[in-house]
Every structure is written in C-alpha cells, then in structure tokens.
Amino acid sequence: MLRMIAAVAEDRNRKAAEYLLLLRLMANELEKAMQSISHNALPDFEESVSNQQVLSARLVALADEISIPLQENPAAPARPIDEDLRRQILVANDGLQKLNRGYAALLQHSSRSVALMVSLFASIQGQFQEASGPRLKYQTWSCQM
C-alpha cells in the first residue's frame, strides 16, 4: 500500500513537471503569435495557433490526470505535488494569464482594424478611377484621398 501511494505521488510530480513545461511552451507560443501578428507573418501565426490548440488539449488532459488519484480514493492520504514545483507552476500560470490578456487585447484590436479596413475598402469600391496615361496613374489609392 505504501509503495502504491509513493508511486501515485511520483506520477503526480512527473505529470506536474510536464504541466509546467507545457505552460512555458504555451507562453512561448503566445509570444510567437503576437510577433507574427506584428510582422504580418500569417503562416507563422497559423502554425502558432495550431500549436496552441495542441498544447491546450494536453494541458486540460494533464490537469484531469493529476486530480484523478485524489478523486478515486479520497480516503488515501493526499500526496501533494512537490512544493517547489507547485510554486513554479503558479508563477508560470500567472505569467501565462498576463500574456493571454495581452494576446486577447491584440487580437481584439487587430479585429477592429481589419473591420475598419474592410469597411473602408467596401465604401470606396467602384469609386476609384485612375487617370489615363502612363504618368498620371496613381501608385496607391491613398494618393487620391
């Protein structure tokens, strides 16, 4: 019985260490996504979003796995996750939440910018006419405004 409890505690610590690693990887992906947006690098952004989805799914699964031993046998003595590891997880989680708020704000701002551009393009569609002749053509439509 004692061996089984020790094995459960070791397994929880291993899963908690993986969880910490995934939190850090997720933070890196959020930073990568924000950089991709700022550099208009759509393929990098799409790759980051895909990686975020994979990491999110694994984080949810790990959180469930870590809590299972306590749910299955509540009478067994609870073996908490290593205190240093738990503290690192809390710090990583706080950092990830801050990044996530910034990421959400950036996406919201970008969405508004895109909507404004679509509206602008739609409002002038069909109204832009270039002057004839090779030297008289506008290089950009902002020159006409």
Image: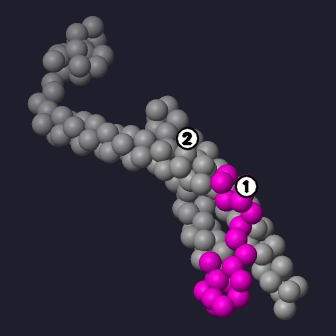
Q: Nearer the viewer, residue 38 or 74?
A: 74
- Of residue 59 and residue 127, the one placed in the foreground of this image is 59
For the residue marked with disc 2, what is the amino acid? Glu
| Residue 101: percent from left, percent from top | 42, 46
**Does the magenta segment cover residue 79?**
yes
Nearer to us in this view, 127 or 36? 36
Is residue 9 in view from this perspective?
yes
Residue 69 percent across, percent down from the top left = 68, 84
* Farthest right residue in view: 3
Q: Position of residue 95 (x, y in %)?
A: 55, 46
Identify residue for label 2.
Answer: 31
Residue plotted at (32% across, 45% down): 108
Q: Is residue 58 above or below residue 50?
A: below
How far separated are the C-alphas under marks 1 and 2?
25 Å
Label 1: element kind: helix
Q: Quadrant of the C terminus?
A: top left
Side (left or right) of 124 relative to 113: left
Upstream in the sequence, badge 1 or badge 2? 2
Q: Residue at x 69, y 79 (%)?
A: 78
Q: Amino acid at mark 1?
A: Asp
Q: Is residue 50 left or right of residue 145?
A: right
Q: Quadrant of residue 53?
A: bottom right
Q: Is residue 83 left or right of residue 122?
A: right
Q: Position of residue 134 (x, y in %)?
A: 28, 12
Number of numbered callouts drawn:
2
Crowdedness near tag 1: few (<14), some (14–19) or many (≥20) residues, C-alpha within 10 Å: few
Question: In the orientation shown, which residue stands out farthest toward the top?
Answer: 135
Q: Is residue 3 magenta?
A: no
Range drawn in magenta: 67-88
Q: Which residue is mark 1?
A: 84
- Name the residue rendered at 12%, 36% in the picture: 123
